[in-house]
Amino acid sequence: MASPFRRKSKDENAKNEEDDLEIEEVVLAEVPEEELDNLPSEIDLEVALMESAKRVTHTCMDIRRGENVLIVCDPTTGEIGQALHRSATERSDRVLLIVMPKSRHHGEEPPSPVANLMRQQQIVIAPTRYSLTHTRAIRTAVKEGARVATMPGMTPEMCVSGGMTADFNEIKKNLSELSSTLRRKRLIHVKDTNGTDIEFEVSWRDWKLDDNGICNRPRMITNLPAGKAFVLPREGTMNGTIVIDGTWESTMLEEPLELVVENGIVIDIKGDSTASHIRQQFGEAASRLKSKDREQVWTVAEFGFGMNPNAKMTGHVLEDEKQLGTCYFSIGDNTSLGGNAAVGIHIPGVITKPSVWLDDTQVLDDGVFVG
């Protein structure tokens, strides 16, 4: 397939500005009025977005001259996509910006033309409403050598504040130091005052400690804002109750959600109307699978805890799950972590003040790291 990139002529900057204006028209049609009301002035926001975009392209991704860069946004994140495009072109003249249709939920595959383009890149940056992290398209791009940053649910306000302002080199250092604590620990026990009481096994070698925001080598992948340690729960070993009291997906919960887990599968979910919505959402995902695989949509797919001191609980799970002292559980697809539940949906929920033990070693006490 012919490369979609070509070198820019000297007159091409004006053409890029015209393209950005066309994207802006699509963006403004999608952004809710209340979000626009809460944003800084247009000039201040544009300057701040460019500063943040430069942090992504120059520091986090360390784009080099001549590298193929693909920026994938949707109509809700086009403003961020434009800023990333402008910043990336300062480093490389082989940068492509694509606006794809908005997905329906986290983990849904992008359109096949977008997936095909991802495979040809050295760098993929994906600020989209719903996460592409746990998709075959991203896994294939990484396998082919791309380094990838996903930014699901990113808003202009998030992009210029909170977790995105953290010192990612410092987070990388703290995550690296955490490895000695995790070493040779097999059993995880999580409790909180709301009723969470859950145990499960992990393979300590499976902990992922590279979600630190520095993504400068082939086959690396990170979320932005970054800052979490996470792992695949060993399939079939989790039993107990999980009470999500922070956020579920991108919703600040008014009442906690209670998930009852047996042998790694959620068998019951209790709560307000959010629980009914979750049943419907996962039921729709299950209906697209073979009957023998439908139960797997309820797999507890991931566990992790936040390590970003600047992240705040905002109702945007991308940032919520990174907040220092919180932990989260994700339900659905676990194949990107080496599991067997290929179900096309992956949604996290955050616990705000957990206590966590690794074997007999306590690492979190009511949301505060021990030691």
Image (cartoon, rainbow, N blue to C red):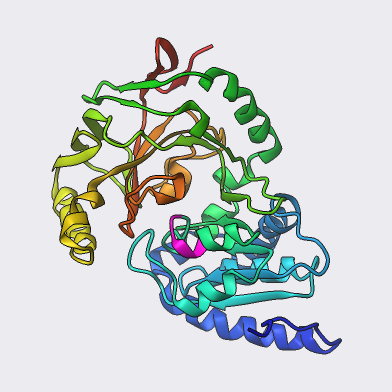
Q: Can you see residue 15? A: yes
Q: Please give left or right for residue 71 compared with residue 100 in the image.
A: right
Residue 302 vs residue 193, the one in the foreground = 302
User: Which region shows up in magenta?
Assistant: 134-138
Magenta run includes residue 149: no
Q: Can you see residue 316? A: no
Magenta segment, prevailing SS (helix, strand or loop): helix
Residue 271 vs residue 51, the one in the foreground = 271
Residue 222 vs residue 184, the one in the foreground = 184
Residue shown at 46% from the left, 77% from the top: 112
Residue shown at 76% from the left, 87% from the top: 14
Image quarter of residue 300: top left
From the top left corner, tell me how far across and down residue 359 is, in percent: 40, 14
From the top left corner, tell me how far across and down residue 332 is, in percent: 30, 50
- State which quarter of the image contains the C terminus: top right
202 is higher (above) or lower (below) than 161: above
Image quarter of residue 313: top left
From the top left corner, tell me how far across and down residue 277 is, in percent: 18, 56
Q: Please give left or right for residue 196 compared with residue 213 in the image.
A: left
43 is higher (above) or lower (below) than 175: below
